[in-house]
Amino acid sequence: MSFYDNVKDASIYIKDHIRKTSLNYSKYFSTLSSNEVYFKLENRQITGSFKIRGAFNKLLSLSQKEKEKGIITASTGNHGLAVAYASNKLNISCEIYVPNIASKIKVSKIKELGSRVIYFGEDCLEAEKKARKDSKLKKSTFISPYNDEYVMSGQGTIAIELIEQIEKLDVAIVSIGGGGLISGISKYIKSTWPEIQVVGCSPKNSSVMISSMYAGKILDIESKHTLSDGTAGGLEFGSITFPICCEYIDQTILVTEDEIKKAMGLYYKNENQIVEGAAGVAIATFLKIKNHFSRKKVGIILCGGNIDQKHFLSLINGN
């Protein structure tokens, strides 16, 4: 089956388990840029991020024997939270490896959903390597945050919704971590809108995929601390997302921590919604390139909203 068919199937399989999120027109951001600007509100998805799409699509694909043996995954938070939620709903035992830098609020939510949390390493790639190793020892299924056809197809269902919600987009801005989200969206959406410009973005402090794209190979480079914890960390060698990102992303942008913080504050002030750092990256990217085009229909994917409210307010108020 083609990737297009896989995404179509995923949309059918997961439709009763997720929300079809809104595509909201923003008067403020449109006026700011002389474009039509729309936000895809995955920050209001179940578990607070797009990750629930890929998690359910993967878990629903497992055989009964695989479900009985349980699953293992690794995550800085949002993927783990999604897998914990899906495994709880499907009655599958679940262990989630997280790096020591993982968001406390996300880890707390994971535990509340009944999954066992195991701390390991300083970034998600280290936790991921350990989780993969232990999954083989325990003969459990490893659920990759991005390097999996089912997970990527699940994230691609966002593209189906976009195509249903608007006649056409000229530009799509998507944050990049391991590349599962932007790979799923870009590969599907270009089959319907071949002229759409896909802009991939990351924080300067952790831009492994973008750096790897420029190098022409997956790099093993260190990531610094970033507000965008949802996109932070390394990239698994041989990831299926890498060649797709190289082929389907038209432009890449890096943003600073200050730009991310300012973008989160501006969105909150004008749209009255809290978004996490990874979504702030996409907003900051739009603000950075908004004068590069005019009278275009721009779609910005707000990938998540999982951030402690007090911490968020402290950030945007400069405390």
Image: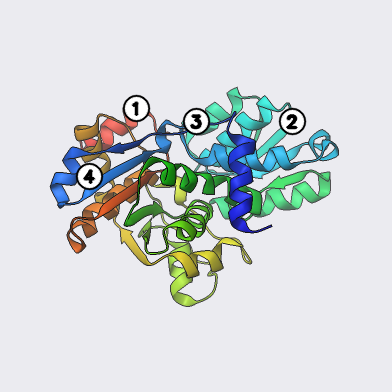
Say if mark 4 contacts mark 3, CB within 8 Å.
no
Residue at image point 54% right, 27% down = 109
Q: CA distance from mark 1 to mark 2?
A: 31 Å
Sequence-earlier tag: 2 or 4:
2
Label 3, on which residue?
19
Q: Amino acid at mark 2?
A: Ile
Sequence-earlier tag: 1 or 3:
3
Q: Which label was assigned to residue 262? A: 4
Q: Percent position (x, y) of residue 139?
A: 83, 46
Say if mark 2 contacts mark 3, CB within 8 Å.
no
Label 1, on which residue?
309
Q: Amino acid at mark 3?
A: Arg
Sequence-earlier tag: 4 or 3:
3
Please name whichever residue, 240 or 195, is drawn nearer the observer in this view of the structure: 195
Q: Amino acid at mark 4?
A: Lys
* Residue 305 makes an appearance in the image: no
Please name whichever residue, 156 or 139, is drawn nearer the observer in this view of the structure: 156
| Identity of the residue furthest to the top in this view | 112
Q: Secondary structure at mark 2?
A: loop
Sequence-earlier tag: 2 or 3:
3
Q: Amino acid at mark 1?
A: Gln
Q: CA distance from mark 2 to mark 4?
A: 40 Å
Sequence-earlier tag: 1 or 4:
4
Label 3 CA crowd tier, 10 Å (few <14, some 14–19, many 20+): some
Q: Which label was assigned to residue 92? A: 2
Q: CA distance from mark 4 to mark 3?
A: 29 Å
**Residue 200 is drawn in which quadrant?**
bottom left
Q: Secondary structure at mark 3?
A: loop
Given this view, does label 2 or label 3 mark the residue nearer the observer?
3
